[in-house]
Image (cartoon, rainbow, N blue to C red):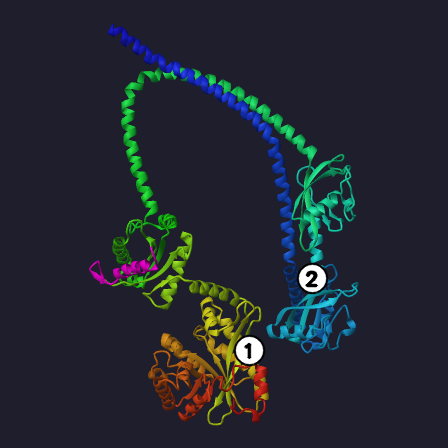
Amino acid sequence: MDRISDEKLLRLIKVTPVIMVVIFTLIINLSVIYDNQTKAKQNIELLRTDIIERQRSLSKNQVQQAVNQIEYEKSHTIDTLKKTIRDRTNEAHTIASSIYQQNIDKPKSQISKLITDALRNIRFNDGRGYFFIYQMDGTNVMLPVLPKNENSSMWNFTDSRGKYAVREMLSIVDKKEEGFHRWWFVKNGSDSEEFEKIGFGKYFKPLGWLIGTGDYIIDVEHDIQEKLLEQLTNIRYGDNGFFIILDQSGTLLAHATPEYVGKNHLLAQDSMGNYFVKAMLDAGKSGGDYVQYLGPETPYTKGGTEKVSYVMNVPGWNWTVGTGWYVNELNDYIGQRQSQLAKQNKQELVKITLLSLSLTIFALFLSVFLSKVIARRFKTFQEKINSDFCELQATKNQMQYMALHDSLTALPNRVLLHDNISKGIERAKLNNKQLAVMFIDLDDFKKVNDLHGHTVGDQLLSAISHEFIKIVGPGDTVSRFGGDEFVFCFQELDSEHCARAKVEQIKQVFTKQFFIDGKWIFSSSSIGVAMYPADGQEPEELISKADIVLYKSKARHKGDVLFFDDSINARVLYDFTLEEQLRLALENNELSVVYQPQIDVLSGRIHGIEALCRWHNKELSHVSPIDFIAVAENIGMIHDIGWFVIKQACSDFKTLTASVPLPISLSINLSPKQLLQTNFAENITNEIRSSGIDTHNVTLEITENVLISDIIGVSPILEELRKRGFKLSLDDFGTGYSSLSYLSNLPINEIKIDRSFIDKLLTSRESESLVKAIIAIGQSCNMQIVAEGVETQEQYKRLSQYHCDIVQGYYFDKPLSINELSQKYMAIDKTSAQP
């Protein structure tokens, strides 16, 4: 009985898998076939919608690309014009130079004729372009379009807006040897409308000429329009794809059928009576849209048919650009695709049926075989699976840990930090709590690496990380942000006071030294703190603001702690705007130079003037030099600004000395970076002398901190400047680490007492004593003493008693423009220092 039962059980084990496989396979096959048929029907139904939508998108993209191309060409009109006239002028200059070199032994009058003969009949830009030549005094040498003006002075020639066109262009070329200039004219054929013209001139040194040419912006724009219309007219895609371009009056500017171009179609109607051109113009004005209409018969459509076009407007030129497709063509294509799809589905159904039958037979045989080995192999496979799963889980955990933690310190990295801050913000919202993000940067960590090596530096980071871990509580996070930077996230705080308590815990970590590789190493840190919700709502915002105040803290004093607030945010925005606007200040002519008189105490007359740079910006208004000079040094603009001040001051000083009968000096402030510029002494000497000014009349002012920071590099430059005749003034004396050694060893002529001491001269014994000491030092070193910031008569009298040589300040005069200065001090009897 038992034997029979075992045999039945064995048969059951062998047959059951086979029966189950057959039934399961049939169910799967039938499901696959049914699903294939259902999807085939759905695909056929969706095909039309998909093709139409793709066609709409394609037409829209084609129009957008065409409009983008038009906008690009339109925006580069002036650049194209400038490049063309610059290239043409350079060609003319090259021709003139070649003729001059080939005939250098001939009289200049003969050379002049050879050059003008060569250039006179040259035309370009569809015949509009020609060359003109002027002498630098305004005398016209060659003007092909108005030869009657040749050999006559055009110095006072003005354009339609009253600008001295020739004079201003000559001025530009005189200063820069070449340059662009703009003026306005009423073109021939235009009653009164003015058109702007751009010219380019280049100095021809051998004959002292200005050679140039120019063109109207509107003419160049017209050339670009014609080029674009030709390009777009010739574009074809598919059998019947082309662009149309209309102006706002309904006139066709571009079309695949040349007969339509140039005609007005505003009132054109399709066979349904729709004004489809008007509809296109309206759609273009609204920002772009699709227009459906019955299109006319064309060589491409072989008869009128329904058409859908996408149109878009081109601002500025008032063009409407469009393209589209014929509905019957699209329907034919959709029908073909649906037939193809149905045929493919039928073929796939046959394949699936055959494949299903094959799989069923194969599965049948396979199930017989597998039923014999399942029991034997099951246990082996189970053990193998369990082993592999445990190993895989361990590897997964390790990789997940590595992806979220720093390899050196094992602290969470930025990804995990960001996630923890996000979770902390959510908890703070629910519990009405606060959260603090603290950005920590180790002070002078590079010195540790440089002195002890990177291995010791890494060990120091690990030791500090271990101490940081002791600070964090449940839910808190400390992360290594990068390099020597760490970020804490403290959650569930009741107030800012709690955050400050956490800051104190962090600072305690750095009160002790770290024993690393047999060395005791001391470290310190600067900390920036941002609070949720006061300072931000997102992790990145809080981290960024903590980073901002961290570096504000380091800039103020290393080792400090700073919490983010509105004033810091406002300052950051102001600094960003200031830097952005300063980059454009010279280009926009926003910088100017003013002059504050320096008064001789004994005579009461003007002794000299100090050139001061001022900046007035339309967005920031008047910006203090204290703010923008430092920014200029940081962004590398100080050289350009410095030379602007030097050149402007020289020009103004030359004008002033022609009207002021007394001998006066010019003081110019130098930036440390400008002073250390290569060949600075030679360059400034050339600039001063080319302006017609004696270097003995120029005093160069440098701050005391320049000497302290790089006395070895500065000393040779100062010696060279003294040899070239310049006087040297030590500005802001007493504010740095003043040393008598460099006063005696360096070629200093003058000491300027900082205004901070003059402000307290009458109220502080310390300031009074310091002022008297500085005057005594200057007298003992045979140096001239200048006091700046004199605001009251009492200050002036007290400085006179102490035998100060020169004074300047608002008591005598505020910084004046060169015109104000010249008017006030142009007569000897007006140079008295009476305020």
Q: Residues within 10 Å of mark 2 (few under 14, many from 20)?
A: some
Q: Can residue 289 be seen from the camera position used here?
A: yes
Residue 383 location, quadrant: top left
The label on residue 648 is: 1
Extent of the magenta region = 494-520
Residue that extends furthest to the top in the rendered view of this protein = 1
Q: Can residue 99 be seen from the camera position used here?
A: no
Residue name at image x 64 percent, y 61 percent: 83
Asked which secondary structure carries label 1, the reply is helix
In the image, what residue type sits under mark 1?
Gln
Q: Position of residue 93 (x, y in %)?
A: 65, 68
Assess whether residue 516 is covered by the magenta stretch: yes
Which residue was labeled with disc 2?
A: 217
Observer-nearest residue: 729 or 278?
Answer: 278
Asked which secondary structure carries label 2, the reply is helix
In the image, what residue type sits under mark 2?
Ile
Q: Earlier in the sequence, mark 2 or mark 1?
A: 2
Assess whether residue 768 is covered by the magenta stretch: no
Residue 495 location, quadrant: bottom left
5 to 67, vertically: above or below? above
Observer-nearest residue: 119 or 156?
Answer: 156
The label on residue 752 is: none
47 on left or right of 108: left
Q: Position of residue 688 (x, y in %)?
A: 53, 81
